[in-house]
């Protein structure tokens, strides 16, 4: 149900509420994707994925979405599911065999092809989405799952490993690795600035956010984040970077020119805090406690450039925050154990 918290003031130019569009949220346990109408605040449809879905990516024109079917402990996934965003339905699957365990996905410019990181095979598998065909893979071997960012022209891919290690840069025209960072990171999330000059890396293990030069992957600055940074994203104009911190339950906003912290937004709700205060002793360390916690794990910038959608684990809430006032605008109900989340400006036909 949509929760309207009133029209906010104090943001440059004012903040529009009720922006039309669709949030797509992956539910790995239910093996489905929910299509949330951001104007009405309701789930307008659900569609089945493959086994163990993880990441989701929207095509450049907003019409299509791809979901990686990673699989579970008992069976490895090996496909992508393709969805029609406006219709809220699955169009079919793209088989990635012999590759297994697809993880992060990004569309190439033009919306005809996409690249996906795959575990235990090659760094990047490529698919022709229109033909639903697998293309020759790019990059060197990768034993673990990888995070991924692409340059806006589709020429370069940037790879980070949540298990830890250096960041790498790959020329997609040749598949050749053209850069390796001296910085190492447990890269939980990557985001390239809109101008393509800098790569932002959420380092979960060090509680830092590294900002690297995209040309040679040298370190510009490492910023102190909260406890366990999980997501990083930049506003459409590139002026602000947003970092979601899981264990400190907050979102930090940084000015990308000065690298100074501009805002700290707590994601804890009153209801969650009251529930936690009522717990004592061993209850605080059981699954019961987790049911009352909102842990921010992912975020997507809103098109207005003034707000951000934050996806929370366990509570299942998706909350849109004003990044200047630091207050919630409205909330939606997503998955209690979500995978990826993505936004399209398209709504139902």
Image (cartoon, rainbow, N blue to C red):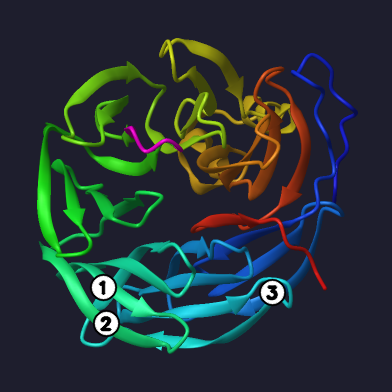
C-beta proximity under 8 Å, tags 2 and 1 = yes
- Is the residue under label 3 in contact with that under label 1 (CB below 8 Å)? no
> Closer to the camera, 206 or 349?
349
Question: Residue tagged by mark 3?
Answer: 46
- Write the residue at 49% across / 79% down: 81
The answer to whether 87 is drawn above or below residue 17 in the figure is below
Quick check: is 227 in the magenta stretch?
no
Q: Tell me if 114 is positioned left or right of 160 in this view.
A: right
**Magenta region, residue range:** 194-199
Q: Is the magenta stretch mostly helix, strand or loop?
A: loop
Q: Residues within 10 Å of mark 2 (few under 14, many from 20)?
A: some
Q: Residue 79 or 108: which is nearer the viewer?
A: 108
Under tag 1, what secondary structure?
strand
Q: In this view, does 4 lie above or below 172?
A: above
Percent across and percent down for residue 305 are 65, 33
Residue 24 sits in quarter: bottom right
**Residue 125 bears which disc, if any?**
1
Crowd band around label 1 with a 10 angstrom C-alpha radius: few (<14), some (14–19), many (20+): many
Disc 2: which residue: 135
Q: For mark 3, give the secondary structure.
A: strand
| Mark 2 or 3, closer to the camera | 2
At horizontal 59% and vertical 45% (from top left) the residue drawn is 311
Q: Which of marks 1 and 3 is nearer the N terminus?
A: 3
The residue sitting at 39% across, 63% down in the picture is: 105
Q: Residue 282 carries which label?
A: none
């Amino acid at each position: 149900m949509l929760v309207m918290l009133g029209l906010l003031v104090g943001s440059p130019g004012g903040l529009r509420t009720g922006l039309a569009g669709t949030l797509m949220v992956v539910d790995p346990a239910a093996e489905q994707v929910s299509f949330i109408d951001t104007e009405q605040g309701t789930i307008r449809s659900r569609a089945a994925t493959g086994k163990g879905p993880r990441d989701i990516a929207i095509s450049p024109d907003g019409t299509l979405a791809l979901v990686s079917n990673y699989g579970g402990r008992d069976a490895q996934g090996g496909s992508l599911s393709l969805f029609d965003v406006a219709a809220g339905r699955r169009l079919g699957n793209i088989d990635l065999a012999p590759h297994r365990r697809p993880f992060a996905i990004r569309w190439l410019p033009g919306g005809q092809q996409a690249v996906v990181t795959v575990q235990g095979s090659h760094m990047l598998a490529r698919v022709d989405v229109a033909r639903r065909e697998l293309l020759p893979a790019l990059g060197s071997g990768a034993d673990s799952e990888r995070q991924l960012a692409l340059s806006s022209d589709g020429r370069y891919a940037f790879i980070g490993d949540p298990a830890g290690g250096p960041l790498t840069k790959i020329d997609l025209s040749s598949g050749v690795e053209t850069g390796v960072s001296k910085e190492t990171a447990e890269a939980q999330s990557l985001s390239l600035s809109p101008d393509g000059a800098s790569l932002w890396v959420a380092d979960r293990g060090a509680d830092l956010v590294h900002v690297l030069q995209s040309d040679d992957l040298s370190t510009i600055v490492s910023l102190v984040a909260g406890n366990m940074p999980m997501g990083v994203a930049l506003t459409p104009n590139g002026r602000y970077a947003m970092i979601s911190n899981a264990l400190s339950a907050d979102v930090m906003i940084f000015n990308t020119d000065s690298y100074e912290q501009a805002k700290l937004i707590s994601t804890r709700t009153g209801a969650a805090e009251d529930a936690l205060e009522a717990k004592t002793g061993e209850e605080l360390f059981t699954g019961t406690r987790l049911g009352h916690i909102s842990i921010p794990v992912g975020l997507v910038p809103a098109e207005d450039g003034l707000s951000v959608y934050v996806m929370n684990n366990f509570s299942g809430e998706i909350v849109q925050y004003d990044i200047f006032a630091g207050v919630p605008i409205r909330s939606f109900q997503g998955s209690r154990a979500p995978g990826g989340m993505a936004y399209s400006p398209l709504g139902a036909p």
